[in-house]
Amino acid sequence: MKKLLKTQRSDTSHWVGDGFPVRTIFGYNDLAKDISPFLMLDYGGPTIFTPSNKIRGVGEHPHRGFETVTIVYAGEVDHRDSSGGGGSISPGDVQWMTAASGLVHEEMHSKKFSQEGGAFEMIQLWVNLPSKYKTAPPKYQAIKNNEIPVVSLPDQGAIVRVIAGEYLGFKGPTQTFTPINLWDIRLSSNRKASFTVPTSQTAAVFVLSGSIILNDGEHISEAEIAILDTVGEEFTLQASADSKLLFLGGAPLNEPIVGYGPFVMNTLEEIQQAFMDYKNGKMGNI
Ligand code: MN
């Protein structure tokens, strides 16, 4: 059985630009070592936006050294970046953007969502790259809702959408640089399910809504993440209410993490270089 290492939650939110009210559940300065290769989890919303002719969001900014993963649950986000990647991310869709050697991008509400308003809920994850891929060219994967396999567990009330990695033989469509499992899990109230993941990989469960009992013991509630030990393969989740969960885990990179703002590298020199390259326009523009 995989043991609980720690839990972490955030009840304070801050704005990213004027489009994203987020709670940072963990960042590269706290739990990144325990949940490698993941560097950050921002939980955006849930919130209601009123209709507006102004398009809210966050304008042009750079990234280098990692990937940004945007999962949209409600609302719609439009994306454009300096390497030519872009598109609309609708509910159920996932955007997997490899910044790697560096790019600039903007993340905005779509025009349609801005004008109509309504419920908005998303997650942005930052996924670290091993040193040798931090200088790889940028890449963009637009993963549509209907490309993501939906695995229904025996009995009713438990569904796993495999965004990346594999679950019960169902493979996610995402290409990743290192082994990663990313699953969108829905558990109905009182439903219990057990999950098996590769041993010596990191594992964490984030609760978007509802609440769960982990391994028949600990209660994990809304906007809280449970980090499990890398030892062992199995854990169980029992929903105390209808629950929406995100499982994240993978092979740890075991490399130094030096991050500053939108750049995450292995050394301070590489961070200074990133700031210089951005300033000198080497990450391009939109
Ligand atoms: Mn960004």
Image: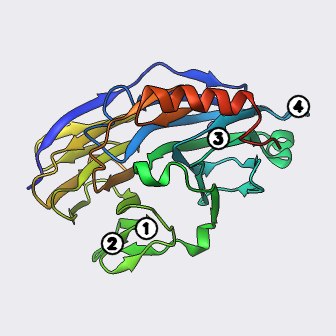
Q: Which residue is mark 1?
A: 162
Residue for point 20% across, 33% down: 6
Residue designated by label 3 = 120
Specify the label residue 54 is tagged with. 4
- Residue indicated by mark 2: 167
Between the C-alphas of marks 3 and 2, the distance is 28 Å
Residue 49, located in which quarter of the rendered image? Answer: top right
* Mark 3 C-beta closer than 8 Å to ligand 1: no
Quadrant containing the N terminus is: bottom left
Q: In the image, is the residue at mark 2 within 8 Å of ligand 1 by its beta carbon?
A: no
Residue type beneath disc 3: Phe
Mark 2 vs mark 1, CA separation in Å: 7 Å
Along the line of sight, which residue is nearer the eye, 159 or 55?
A: 55
Q: Which mark is residue 51?
A: none
Compare residues 217 and 29 and report the one nearer the observer.
29
* Distance between mark 4 and mark 2 Cα atoms: 41 Å
In which quadrant is the C terminus drawn?
A: top right
